[in-house]
Image (cartoon, rainbow, N blue to C red):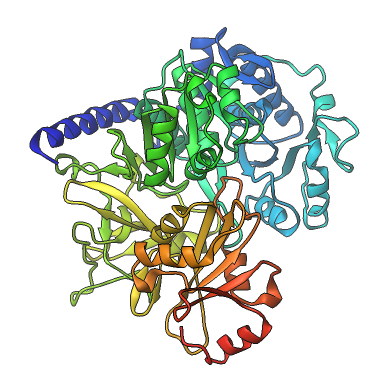
């Protein structure tokens, strides 16, 4: 990076940070301005403009507000009081947004439940938020039924849609009846402060039961305003949103950036790689919201003229790998992508606002005093930060991976409100990092910062593992495998092998047609150091993902390389033959008994 490039980047980051700070300067924990107030302010400003387009239906800001008001008055009618919680178990639709907006108007918290859950997982999410009622769409009746015996909801279970749907629940549409569309009086939320919880959004559950993260009014407003400014959304934009509304990227950042700008939200029920570009064309979309896997799925589709026939010129999201990003720009012509890093609950966030492919953001030296995140050396085996002789943490050197941490304070951008489960909150706090008594939020992510200040995501802690006395980054290995012709997805993880130190690398691969194992072995030999090459390979047709398309590794790790636990083809690396060879029951016993050298 030469001097001119550095100065240009510094200016871009400085100006964007100024815009974000200016947009959020009045958002403080002791403010009387709540999310409900912000929604009403935007409705008054853009009343007759189109807010949501969904399945051919057009909803203005005024119409959206009227629906939210009816939900609010219904809530008051069944006895919901400020501070109470309602679980929202619903698939993407305009009522999803209108419902939690209505609850915000009466200071009732809404728990945004993953619509793919059922049974004990669903019951856990409802109970951990201490919800008094549950609202759902009728089509989710079977999922609810699997959890019903585990639920106690004194304000009842309510459904929208088919009046006969969801047995055992009451029809909310009928209950709304002639409920007024007038706004509930602001006294319903009087005396409440922005530091109080507005929503619960759950962690994705890739490694266990989801945790209910507290989204305060401060955090909600900060997220919405920050993305509005970081991406440069304006009232003429038409934002294509195919992500689930129960997660922060789609439900808060996507919805919020459109709301704050007075833009139009083109809401879809779910993402479809084969229909995405046609939906963009048909709806005249100018902007998109993505997560990394969405980009990869699109790039796995055959090239088509539709990729260039749309009107999308910008977008934002997170997790877009550098190789996919490069191809995405080349094929689609969409160059203004704001990649970001952040967690639902955390106080560490980055925006890549100057388009550096592969980076999640930058900390220019001039902004180090404002962007306070740090990266500390990390012990992969002990899964804890490295501490020096003085007992304090050690900052990672340029390009050295370290855990990203953020200082915890009462400042709006440095708050950590934690989870409803206090024990989970404590696990995310690092104490005595640089001085005795300080507190830092642990992201659980390994990241690196280069000499120019660009920040790159390396791996989730727990995904990175040690093999042959070396640290293996699953992300690096996944990129290498995915570059092999025919591979559609690669999920890399470590598995225990009796008699071996550390964990051996294993890859679950999805492919188009058959894969030449000898050629794959040779490819990985050229692209990866010996310790990082997968020892085991599993071929699977479908990969289980969360609602935000993140892969669930927990079940893959549990099955390991045991042919008795999966019907998928399993293979182990054979250096002598220069290929991967099949694992059957006999081979498995040899591996477990240490008869094979790995």
Q: Position of residue 321 (x, y in %)?
A: 41, 47
Q: Position of residue 7 (x, y in %)?
A: 13, 33
Horizontal side of 93 relative to 367 (left or right) equals right
Horizontal side of 244 relative to 567 (left or right) equals left
Residue at the image point whose x is 52% and y is 24% from the top: 305
Residue farthest toward the left in the current orientation of the protein: 3
Tell me if I can see residue 291 in this picture: yes
Q: Quadrant of the N terminus?
A: top left
Above or below, 383 relative to 173: below
Residue at the image point whose x is 82% and y is 20% from the top: 177
Q: Position of residue 107 (x, y in %)?
A: 58, 33
Tell me if I can see residue 443 in this picture: no
Horizontal side of 248 relative to 404 (left or right) equals right
Residue at the image point whose x is 56% and y is 75% from the top: 581
Report how many numbered discs are placed on residues in the image: 0
Above or below, 63 relative to 105: above
Above or below, 148 relative to 320: below
Above or below, 460 relative to 31: below
In front here: 348 or 43?
A: 348
Quadrant in the rendering for residue 462: bottom left
Residue at the image point whose x is 56% and y is 55% from the top: 551
In front here: 348 or 498?
A: 498
Q: Position of residue 166 (x, y in %)?
A: 85, 40
């Amino acid at each position: 990076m030469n001097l001119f490039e550095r100065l240009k980047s510094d200016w871009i980051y400085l100006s964007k940070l100024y815009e974000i700070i200016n947009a959020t300067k009045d958002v403080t924990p002791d403010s009387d301005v709540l999310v409900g107030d912000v929604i009403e302010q935007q409705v008054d400003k853009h009343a007759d403009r189109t807010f949501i387009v969904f399945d051919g239906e057009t909803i203005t800001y005024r119409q959206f507000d009227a629906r939210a008001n009816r939900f609010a008055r219904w809530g008051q009618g069944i006895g919901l009081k400020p501070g109470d919680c309602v679980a929202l178990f619903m698939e993407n639709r305009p009522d999803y947004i209108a419902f939690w907006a209505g609850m915000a108007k009466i200071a009732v918290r809404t728990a945004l439940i993953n619509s793919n859950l059922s049974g004990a997982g669903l019951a856990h999410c409802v109970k951990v938020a201490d919800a008094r009622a549950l609202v759902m769409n009728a089509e989710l009746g079977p999922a609810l039924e699997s959890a019903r015996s585990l639920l106690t909801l004194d304000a009842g279970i309510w459904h929208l849609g088919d009046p006969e749907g969801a047995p055992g629940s009451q029809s909310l549409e009928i209950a709304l009846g002639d409920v007024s569309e007038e706004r509930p009086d602001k006294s319903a939320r009087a005396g409440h402060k922005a530091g109080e919880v507005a929503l619960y959004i759950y962690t994705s559950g890739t490694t266990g039961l989801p945790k209910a993260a507290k989204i305060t009014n401060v955090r909600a407003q900060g997220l919405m305003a920050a993305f509005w400014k970081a991406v440069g959304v304006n009232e003429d934009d038409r934002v294509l949103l195919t992500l689930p509304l129960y997660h922060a990227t789609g439900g808060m950042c996507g919805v919020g950036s459109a709301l704050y700008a007075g833009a139009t939200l083109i809401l879809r029920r779910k993402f479809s790689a084969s229909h995405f570009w046609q939906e963009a064309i048909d709806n005249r979309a100018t902007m998109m919201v993505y997560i990394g896997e969405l980009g990869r799925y699109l790039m796995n589709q055959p090239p088509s003229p539709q990729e260039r026939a749309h009107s999308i010129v910008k977008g934002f999201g997170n997790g877009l790998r550098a190789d996919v990003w490069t191809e995405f720009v080349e094929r689609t012509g969409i160059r203004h992508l704001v990649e970001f890093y952040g967690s639902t609950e955390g106080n560490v966030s980055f925006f890549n606002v100057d388009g550096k492919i592969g980076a999640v953001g930058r900390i220019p030296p001039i902004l180090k005093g404002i962007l306070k995140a740090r990266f500390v050396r990390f012990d992969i085996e002990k899964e804890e930060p490295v501490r020096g002789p003085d007992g304090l943490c050690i900052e990672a050197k340029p390009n050295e991976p370290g855990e990203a941490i953020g200082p915890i304070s009462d400042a709006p951008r440095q708050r950590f409100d934690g989870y409803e489960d206090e024990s989970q909150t404590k696990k995310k706090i690092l104490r005595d990092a640089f001085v005795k008594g300080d507190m830092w939020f642990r992201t659980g992510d390994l990241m690196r910062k280069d000499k120019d200040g660009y920040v790159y995501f390396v791996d989730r802690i727990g995904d990175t593992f040690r093999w042959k006395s070396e640290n293996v980054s699953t992300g690096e290995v996944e990129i290498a495998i995915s570059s092999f012709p025919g591979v559609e997805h690669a999920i890399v993880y470590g598995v225990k092998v009796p008699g071996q130190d550390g964990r051996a690398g294993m890859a679950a691969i999805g492919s188009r047609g058959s894969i030449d194992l000898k050629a794959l072995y040779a490819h990985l030999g050229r692209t990866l150091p010996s310790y990082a090459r997968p020892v085991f390979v599993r071929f699977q047709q479908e990969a289980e993902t969360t609602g935000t398309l993140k892969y669930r590794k927990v079940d893959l790790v549990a099955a390991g390389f045991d042919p008795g636990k999966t019907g998928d083809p399993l293979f182990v690396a054979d250096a002598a033959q220069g290929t991967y060879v099949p694992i059957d029951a006999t081979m498995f016993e040899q591996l477990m008994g240490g008869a094979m050298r790995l």
